[in-house]
Image (tube, helix red, strand yellow):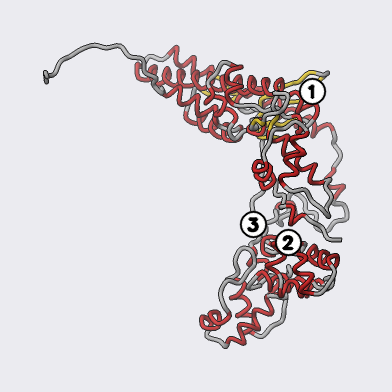
Amino acid sequence: MRLDYQLEMRQTHKLLMTPQLQQAIKLLQLPVLELNLYLQQKILENPMLELNEEAEREEESLEQHEEEEFDFEWEQYLHQGDEGYRGEDSDKASFEQYTAGTLTLHQLLRQQLSMISLPARVERTAAYIIDNLSADGYLRISTAEIARQLQVQEADALEGLAVVQTLDPAGIGARSLRECLLLQVDRRKDAPPFAREIISDHLDLVAKGRIPVIAEALQADYAPVQKAIDYIRSLEPKPGVSLSTDSPSQFIMPDVTVFKVAGKWVILVNDSYSHRLHLSPSYQAMLQNADSPGTKKFLRDKLNSALWLLKAIEQRRTTLYRITEFILEYQESFFSKGVKHLRPMRLLDVAQALDIHESTVSRATNGKYLQTPRGIYAFKYFFAANLDTIDGVGVASTGVKEVLEEVVATEDKGNPLTDQELALILQRRGVKISRRTVAKYREQLGIPSSNLRRRWQ
């Protein structure tokens, strides 16, 4: 065997991730809000990019025209006779300058506590308990531990806990689910017969739906026990969650909007920011007149970068438009008839129809939303799993779930359908589905088992 070094030339094909390709992939993945932030950053970095000032001036002139159209002093009229009204020269802040702040669970409870006249030791203990409540409103440490940390008697800790448990909402400061529910029952005063007994002694059987066992233990009929359990299930198991206001609101900005005009679908890609982006004429002129090689090279690099960015934006817009157009055509029955008529669709189906790679479809649709006359849907919503049908056409799993919800909603509550019976009903409607698949879809929809759905009247 020969072991030595030698030089040879060989041609090979290799895919390189150029910076331009990486930029195009990144832009394709960005939702509309993140895209706007990305473009704003690029405008600051690249002098060759600028926004269309004429469009901005048109918007400003339109706003000014709307303001000049009415010369009536609306603010003065609305505030006439209001002592809170202040003119422009006033140093005092107006009501409109303030916005509602978010308060945590502990801050809201401390506000309530400050309105109660209590001895100093009890108020101190109650405040300490409030600070140690969990996010759902439960007290996870013992009163003995509280007494040890505050160096007071346990009776004082219990007295402070009793004060906290009188605050709103009912159930705050409970040490267990049973105590939380009992506090709510005592506060509401509208509990049906057997509710307190069931919470105290048979709460574990309620979760299992063992109504006959509970009724036998209480020596009562099924109907009043069912009524008491319905009342218990209406109580709040996590009172702190309902009181807290520090959770952020969810806001969705659709990337594409579709609507019908004269019987035809119109597609609008939401790129209101990017369509005003263009090359700077002043810097292009500067490039042509530049004498310094360093300046010319700098401006030329910035020009190439800007051209690639504009090309990537247009490619993103075109890809989203084509994918949406395909979805409108392929899922026409969904848009005209509803969710039950959603057809099974794969990323591969879109990729083959548009002659693009499957990963491109995945990047273009991931995390993006489509606004339709039926509501706002994630693009991934339309890529539902396929279930075989008797006629061989197939049906989307989303449509099957919709039918499953309808069947359960109309079943006999006194004798609910089992998973096997639900599977047989769907099979009679032409869907090839097993009992295990029905059970999986039922759990995904949050529908309890037949034993828990049964109503005893």
Q: Which mark is drawn over residue 209? A: 2
Q: Disc 3 designates what residue? A: 246
Q: Which mark is drawn over residue 241? A: none
In-front residue for pair 11/340: 340
Residue 21: x and y, percent?
Answer: 46, 22
Task: Say if 402 sits above or below 43 in the image.
Answer: below
Alpha carbons under labels 3 and 1: distance apart: 40 Å
Residue 452: x and y, percent?
Answer: 74, 57
Residue 86: x and y, percent?
Answer: 78, 53
Q: Secondary structure at mark 3?
A: loop
In-front residue for pair 72/423: 423
Kind of residue sitting beneath label 3: Asp
**Image quadrant containing the C terminus:** bottom right
Q: Residues within 10 Å of mark 3 (few under 14, many from 20)?
A: few
Task: Say if 394 sits above or below 169 in the image.
Answer: above
Tag in front: 2 or 3: 2
Mark sitting earlier along the chain (2/3): 2
Task: Say if 379 sits above or below 420 in the image.
Answer: above
- Residue 128 relative to residue 331: left or right: left
Tag in front: 2 or 1: 2
Q: Secondary structure at mark 1?
A: strand
Q: Disc 1 designates what residue? A: 260
Q: Residues within 10 Å of mark 1 (few under 14, many from 20)?
A: few
